[in-house]
């Protein structure tokens, strides 16, 4: 049987002393979060090569551009069309 918890769900533990912390601002990044920021975690070896977000973006744009040259965007036939309208 579980012990009854004497603390309510909203009560903080005594070791959390937020009064001693400096510089905390509520909602500091709320605007950026609402804007829909996309974060991607790079492999450590890739992070050594691509040191800035601009370098990553430039490379990804180049890859996309190459894929459009190799495979132009044309309407792809549906599965049904490939099978001969089964």
Image: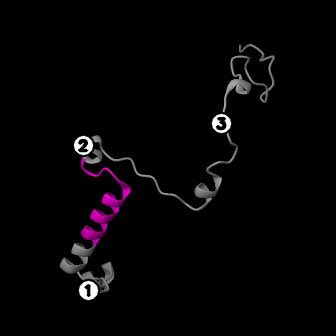
Query: In terms of secondary structure, what is the magenta stretch mainly?
Result: helix
Name, please, the residue furthest toward the left: 70
Judge whether residue 28 is colored magenta.
no
Closer to the camera, 55 or 10?
55
Name the residue located 30 percent from the left edge and 65 percent from the top edge: 58
Question: Which percent across, then down, holds residue 71?
Answer: 21, 79
Question: Which percent across, then down, holds residue 61?
Answer: 30, 69
Q: Is residue 49 above or below residue 1?
A: below
Q: Residues within 10 Å of mark 3 (few under 14, many from 20)?
A: few
The stretch in magenta equals 49-64
Asked which secondary structure carries label 3, the reply is: loop
The residue labelled by disc 2 is: 45
Name the residue located 25 percent from the left edge and 69 percent from the top edge: 62
Which quadrant of the rendered structure holds the C terminus?
Answer: bottom left
Name the residue located 31 percent from the left edge and 78 percent from the top edge: 79
Query: What's the distance in space between the residues labelled 2 and 3, CA to CA?
Result: 34 Å
The reply to whether discs 3 and 1 touch (Cβ–Cβ < 8 Å) is no
Judge whether residue 56 is colored magenta.
yes
Q: Earlier in the sequence, mark 2 or mark 1?
A: 2
Name the residue located 62 percent from the left edge and 59 percent from the top edge: 34
Query: What's the distance in space between the residues labelled 3 and 1, CA to CA?
Result: 66 Å
Name, please, the residue furthest toward the front: 23
The residue labelled by disc 3 is: 23
Q: Is residue 14 above or below residue 77?
A: above
Q: Is residue 65 left or right of residue 38?
A: left
The picture quadrant where one finds residue 75 is bottom left
Q: Is residue 66 left or right of residue 17?
A: left
Of badges 2 and 3, nearer the viewer stands 3
Q: Is residue 4 left or right of residue 32?
A: right
Q: Earlier in the sequence, mark 3 or mark 1?
A: 3
The residue labelled by disc 1 is: 84
Asked which secondary structure carries label 2, the reply is: helix
């Amino acid at each position: 049987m579980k012990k009854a918890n004497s603390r309510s769900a909203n009560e903080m533990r005594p070791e959390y002393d937020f009064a001693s912390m400096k510089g905390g601002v509520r909602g500091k990044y709320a605007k950026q979060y609402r804007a829909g920021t996309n974060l991607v975690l790079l492999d450590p070896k890739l992070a050594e090569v691509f040191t800035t977000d601009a370098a990553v973006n430039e490379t990804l744009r180049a890859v996309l551009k190459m894929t459009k040259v190799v495979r132009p965007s044309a309407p792809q036939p549906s599965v049904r069309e490939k099978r001969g309208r089964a």
